[in-house]
Image: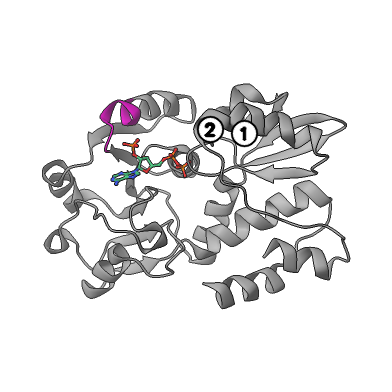
Amino acid sequence: MHNAAFKVLGLDWVYLAFNVEPQWLPDAVVGIRALGFKGVNVTIPHKEAILPLLDEIDPLAKLIGAVNTVVVKEGKLVGYNTDASGFWRSLKEEGVDPQGKEALVLGAGGAARAVAFTLVERGCSKLYIANRTYNRAQELAEALKEAGPVSIEPLPLEEGPLSTILPEVDLIVNTTSVGMGGKGGELPLRADKLEARHIVYDLVYNPPSTKLLEMARSKGCRAISGLSMLLYQGAEALTLWTGREAPIEVMKQVLEELL
Ligand code: ATR
């Protein structure tokens, strides 16, 4: 989508993907400047680990504790978070208002931080954070105290605790990589605990429909894929790098064709 956007904007730029192993992250970050890049996106599993390696962090990204976009500004590496605004824009587009809703976030990584922060900031009444590694859920719950006066409860990502809270939850957001790339693995959510009133949002965008979303649809729930968040976080990143308005329609068309 970025390459299509660059073309439309008449920029002789290219967007490439690099698979960086965790032990090489510091070297890769040094390379951003050395190679003369305009910026990069940062994704799983580096969104938190990159913070201490940057020169400056935008206040929102600092508050969230995760960076998904880096801009090289006058030789300085500046970290931003466009996941939060991308998530919020996609919620608005879907007509979902978190105000007064109880929400369950699955996962406690970089993407979860942006989502959970947005839900608290936008007035959810209660937030559960369920993660495979329980202490990461606890850490995120603790960090979110700064975002607003909302009751936040960490949970282990297990069938029992999730089944107990589902009757009171309105919105369920999967931020884990379970289902990404069509890979196996299943979330411990029981179909018989889902009700038609649940709104189920899966940040996974590849494939566009996941097992979780199919299960949600089969129970009559509203099911939202990660495609529009992918689009909007990307559009904002593009504006940060280029200073230009993102050609949303072109980017959307490419995403839909590819995915
Ligand atoms: P991102 O920045 O994209 O959120 P991340 O910080 O590496 O990436 O987080 C990935 C999330 O997916 C984490 O919540 C991770 O759980 P752990 O904290 O226990 O690692 C979750 N995750 C990845 N694979 C998983 C799996 N097979 N089952 C459950 N959760 C998984």
Residue at 80%, 59% in the rendered image? 245
Instruction: Give left or right: position of 202 versus 16.
Output: left
The residue tagged with tag 2: helix, strand or loop?
helix
Dots 1, 2 in contact, CB < 8 A: yes
Residue 229's place in the image compared with 85, above or below, is below
Q: Amino acid at mark 2?
A: Ile
Q: Is mark 1 within 8 Å of ligand 1?
A: no
Residue 49, given in percent of the width and then of the height, sits at 53, 28
Give 227 or 7, whichever is nearer the viewer: 7
User: Which residue is denoted by mark 1 in the rendering?
Assistant: 60
Residue 187 - label: none
Residue 224's place in the image compared with 22, above or below, is below
Residue at 32%, 53% in the rendered image? 172
Residue 109, given in percent of the width and then of the height, sits at 42, 37
The stretch in magenta equals 132-138
Residue 131's place in the image compared with 246, above or below, is above
The Cα atoms of the two marked residues, 1 and 2, are separated by 6 Å
Residue at 87%, 61% in the rendered image? 11
Asked whether the viewer can see residue 50, the reply is no
User: Which residue is denoted by mark 2 in the rendering?
Assistant: 64
Q: Amino acid at mark 1?
A: Leu
Quadrant containing the N terminus is bottom right
